[in-house]
Amino acid sequence: DLPSFLQCYRSVPDLENASFRRLLFRYSYHTCLCERIELSKGMRRKAVRPKASDGAETHRDAKSNRCSPQTCLYTAVSFGSLFALLCFAFWPDTSVQPLIADLRRDIGGHVVATVYNDDRSLQFLTSGASVVGAQYLAAEFRDQAAFTGFAVQQSALYAKPTARLALQLGLGAGIVATFLREHGLRVDVVEMSESTLFMAQKHFGYNSCCTSEAARCENATKNAQACRDKVGRTTLQDAREFLFNNRETAQKYDIVISDLFMGSNPGHLHSKQVFEHIRHAWLLPDGIAVVNFVAPHLGPGSLGARALARTLQTVWQHVHCYRDQHPDEEIDAAANLCCFASDTHLRFQIPRTGDFRDPTEHSAFWVMTHFQAWEVLLPNVEQDSSAEIILDGNNSLLIAGSQK
């Protein structure tokens, strides 16, 4: 739980007072893995990864009921529901107290919050029971995705270096959209929750070209159109309604990203009909669709992921799905599965210089240079023949309990 994690964090000598030490979070479903990173002034991107003591089998010290420093490398943090976060905010031990910076309720009743970790080196965006975004607060780390799943999505930039236009379905904290914009793309975004948009703009640096408190684009400044022409338009609407009801222009995109997880994968946005519509109405002929899906890649819980892969393979000629961590790590756990689909051969041209040369392990740059070795859900006739093709009229993702 979060208090145990923060106790573990506190137990590392001088960690909270060291200016050049940070925590790196790697996102997998509802779990963040914590590891200690030491950074020196002269080696900003270098990390020293402490080794656990020999024979250590536990992450907790039985006598003190705290994590011992020697076994603090990978302490799981389950954020659970926002109710739990609110409880943690009033945890009796003030030395392990996280901070809720802002809190709103959207029209659907979900509580959307911005939460800092206790030393304010990281901030998280939560919606209901889900963590939908995270960001380093230190300026020197702002160019890195705090969650590995976002780093894999950002790699779409290197699969199509000539891309100029992108559409993102699902904003979260705006981490991926902002990254692509900073690399010269105009990115249009569709987000259903006004509270999520408000938080992304107020706390995570997302630019919606709006100035109103509620981040409503229709109340934008007189310079809004010039802003939108440069960075992209933001639309508050359900993604499926947007896809099928908003073809006012002939605009098509180099990249379409779908990242819509909200505690479960919304079935009405993962059907063959939706993907066919994206391919024909929204993507350029050589465009790339990127679909993030949260599920295990093996075992009984992988049925949804296998169905997604097979469905994508019926729409596009080339489909490759990557886990946001090595397939041999936590093999039964749900993780971000990021599928890239296109009618042209996919080739990632990942840089090999600058921050991409000898990057810190588990950093965004390291993930981008390694994730192609984490491919899962490879086309296999024997396996895929039993997988469902997700259709509007036959969609198991819509059945209650099917994604547990």
Image (tube, rainbow, N blue to C red):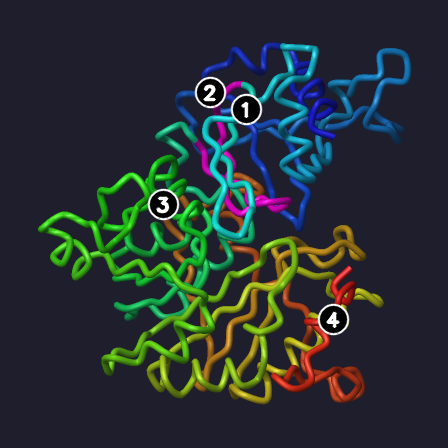
Earlier along the polypeptide chain: callout 2 or callout 3?
2
Q: Which mark is residue 38?
A: 1
Instruction: Name the residue carrying label 2.
Output: 20
x and y percent of residue 215 in the render?
30, 46
- Amino acid marked by disc 2: Phe
Residue 16 among magenta residues: no
Q: Is residue 95 above or below residue 292?
A: above
Q: What secondary structure is marked by label 1? A: strand
- Snapshot quadrant of residue 163: bottom left
Q: Which residues are magenta?
A: 119-136
Residue 129 among magenta residues: yes
Q: Residue at x 69, y 73 (%)?
A: 377
Q: Is residue 200 above or below residue 249?
A: above
Q: Are marks 3 and 1 in contact (CB under 8 Å)?
A: no
Q: Is residue 302 above or below residue 228?
A: below
Instruction: Name the residue carrying label 4.
Output: 399
Q: Are marks 4 and 1 in contact (CB under 8 Å)?
A: no
Q: Nearer the viewer, residue 56 or 156?
A: 156
- Amino acid marked by disc 1: Glu
Q: Separation of disc 4 and disc 1 at Cα?
A: 46 Å
